[in-house]
Amino acid sequence: MNRRTVKRAALITAAVLTVGAGAGYVYLDATSDVQRTGAAACTDVIPAGAERADGEAVCATLDALTAAWGHGDADAYGRLFTENATYTTYIGSHYEGRSDITEGHRALFEDFVKGSKLAASYLDMRFPVKDVALLTGRGDDYTGSKPSVAELSKVQTYTLVRDTDGVWRIAAFHNTQRQNVMERFSFLYSPATAPKAEK
């Protein structure tokens, strides 16, 4: 085989592999919609048997969080967290304490997320012990048109506690960016890894 033929074969092979990888990515992306998108209203996930007033108070905290974000009000946003709260972003930034959360968001509201709003759906609320609530959901920040619940790209976990003044505040927040193509690939490669709601 001459050098020219080898070069041509290598280029054709590279082109075929590139097109195949691109087509595979497009397929995985197109088939990666979540089945369980959650409820549009937080109050829809208050568990049976829980004190309704507590569930509504937890939801009021999340509503206030959404409003504070929408107004770019870092002080109002920070007041919704306990004094020693932790806050982990989807890029891995980890804030410790209300002051750190407030000041970090003050900078965000003036720059990266200026003028944005929050969209959310709610998957589950539990009260594992008295005065503690766990809330999971899907969410995103946005500008322009509000995304549909199927388009929300983050999975979020809130741990709320009834604070010393009786107000429900967020003690811990964790935000995870959903990697839809990787998730779809893992479910195809190992179907048993898919959550029951996604089978």
Image (cartoon, rainbow, N blue to C red):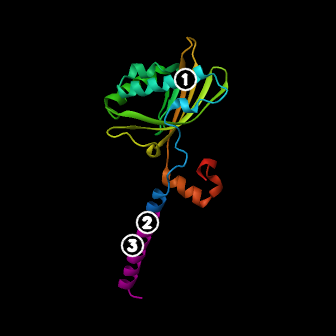
Q: Residue furthest bottom?
A: 1
Labelled disc at residue 112: none
- Of mark 2 and mark 3, the one earlier in the sequence is 3
Numbered disc 1: secondary structure: helix
Query: In the rendered structure, are the residues bearing label 3 and label 1 in contact, judged by CB atoms less than 8 Å apart?
Result: no
Q: Which residue is mark 1?
A: 56
Q: Amino acid at mark 1?
A: Glu
Residue 157, image x, y percentages: 55, 34
| Residue 156 covered by magenta stretch | no
Query: In the rendered structure, are the residues bearing label 1 and label 2 in contact, judged by CB atoms less than 8 Å apart?
Result: no
Answer with the quarter of the image where residue 168 lies.
Answer: top right
- Of mark 1 and mark 2, the one earlier in the sequence is 2
Labelled disc at residue 23: 2
Q: Nearer the viewer, mark 3 or mark 1?
A: 1
Q: Which residue is mark 3?
A: 15
CA separation, marks 3 and 1?
57 Å
Answer with the quarter of the image where residue 9 lies.
Answer: bottom left
Judged by its main secondary structure, the magenta piece is helix
Magenta residue span: 1-24
